[in-house]
Amino acid sequence: MGHEIVERGPLQGRRAAASPGAEADPDLDLVLRWQAGEEEAFEALIRRHERRVYRLLLRMLGTPEEAEDAAQETFLNLHRHGHAFRRDARFSTFVYRVAANAALNRRRSRGRSHARERSLAGMQQAGFEGPESPQDPEAAYAQSELRGRVQRGLLEIAPKLRLPLVLYDLEGLAYPEIARLLELPEGTVKSRIHRARELLREALVADGAIGRSQS
Amino acid sequence: MRHSEVHSDLGDYLEGDLPLDRRALVDAHLDSCDACAGRLHELRATVDALRTLGEVAPPPDLARAVMARIAAGEGRPPWAVRLARRVPAPLRGRLVAPVVALASAAVVAVWLRAPANPTIEPVVPAPTAQSLADAIERSGRFGAAAEDVDEEAVVGPRAAADELSRALGSPSAWLGTAAALEPRARGELLAMLAKAPGSAEGLRSLAAELRRLSDPRAPAIADEIDRLAAPAP
């Protein structure tokens, strides 16, 4: 595995969390060059991590506009505080943590209702591209509807529960990795994920997005 | 098993995290309870639905936009870090150590200014340079609040006043640090000193002290300081 933060498909290989420092940090060379003052190295680090940062923020915040703003804030904060990065964790963990802070701070700093309005409006053009894009227009529409409902359901969940859920089910991180990243006991992470799933289940059932009749 | 017990186990059940004996109990319950089996089905469908969100691509110009904001002065590291980066690596320790000591002095000064109570000995030890550096790193690394602070605004005036005080206390040591800086970095340091309230007189004293030294680097730096301390025309 190249990264401590291992991107896996949901529900795959959860128990095989990489131990920190098990392999060399693939970002180390760029980080050292950047810390020595080479700004081009920082740009390369952005390009290497922008996809996962943006994806996490989009799931957490709900609209492309907010995700982009928060992604820019994340990288500016990284630039501001990157001197503090030491090698006791992978750089990718550091990046995720700053992104998670950006998401949580953003939620705190503005009204929830405002966020919801924007998220509902923006959802239609959020560019949620599924792993497979059905060619059949009806199927494509149904899938787009489902994605909209899922994202709406996600935004109904409190951020402190939503974040571990997103990290686990969408980013594919394992419990120990999330625990390190959020500085929480592993048991707390686990219970928050289960609780968040329960809340999402209730929301999707209430919304008619899923039902027992489906199989 | 009761329904509520099964419900609380469903998350681990779905993940395959239940011990085998417990799993067997849940399985037995699910075989005979449509409500709980339905709930498990919904939970599975929820996770499947979540996965339909799939992949997204970041905006194509994200990196460029961030670099443009950095070039415009946003996301700058604290001044001490910027200065340290401009110092040649072999000399870096000579700058970083005084800077950390300076920050320490600022914290100690605040601590000393706290309301005095002669009957109570302070039980918290004064921060050491190392402990302060560690604290700064911790807050800088992961602290959400620290990321929102305009560090230069907070640290500037006090740090400048303390730096000036330190320079006056040991002009020759201070000269060594200042001379080791690249000209631009030294300009930044001196500009910071000049910003401290009431610093003009102190700067002129510093320039005079430097001129008394036999160090050949001193006159040019003293001239730089005098220019900064000169009253505006």
Image (tube, coloured by chain):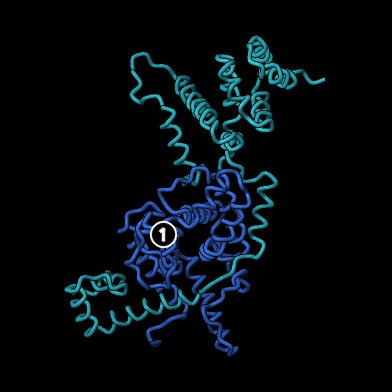
Q: Residue at x 30, y 59 (%)?
A: A187
Shade of chain A as shown in the rendered figure: blue
Pointer 1: what residue?
A4
Q: Residue furthest left?
A: B21
Q: Residue furthest right?
A: B233
Q: Residue at x 55, y 31 (%)?
A: B91
Q: Is residue A65 left or right of residue B15?
A: right
Q: Is residue A213 above or below residue B139?
A: below
Q: Residue furthest top?
A: B212
Task: Assign the C terminus of chain A to one quadrant of the image.
Answer: bottom left
Element assignment for label 1: loop
Query: B108 or A103: which is nearer to us?
Result: B108
Q: Residue at x 61, y 74 (%)?
A: A124
Circle 1 Cα neighbour tier, 10 Å, few/some/many (<14 / 14–19 / ≥20): many
Q: Residue at x 58, y 88 (%)?
A: A135
Q: Amino acid at mark 1?
A: Glu
Q: Is residue A21 above or below residue B15?
A: above
Q: Position of residue B227 (x, y in %)?
A: 75, 20
Image-quadrant location for residue B18: bottom left
Q: Is residue B149 above or below residue A118?
A: above
Q: Is residue B215 left or right of residue B29?
A: right
Q: Is residue B224 above or below residue A195?
A: above
Task: Assign the N terminus of chain A to one quadrant of the image.
Answer: bottom left
Q: Position of residue B9 (x, y in %)?
A: 26, 70
Q: Position of residue B62 (x, y in %)?
A: 64, 60
Spot the cyan chain and give its letter.
Answer: B
Q: Position of residue A89 (x, y in %)?
A: 41, 51
Q: Count the marks: how many?
A: 1
Q: Chain of mark 1?
A: A
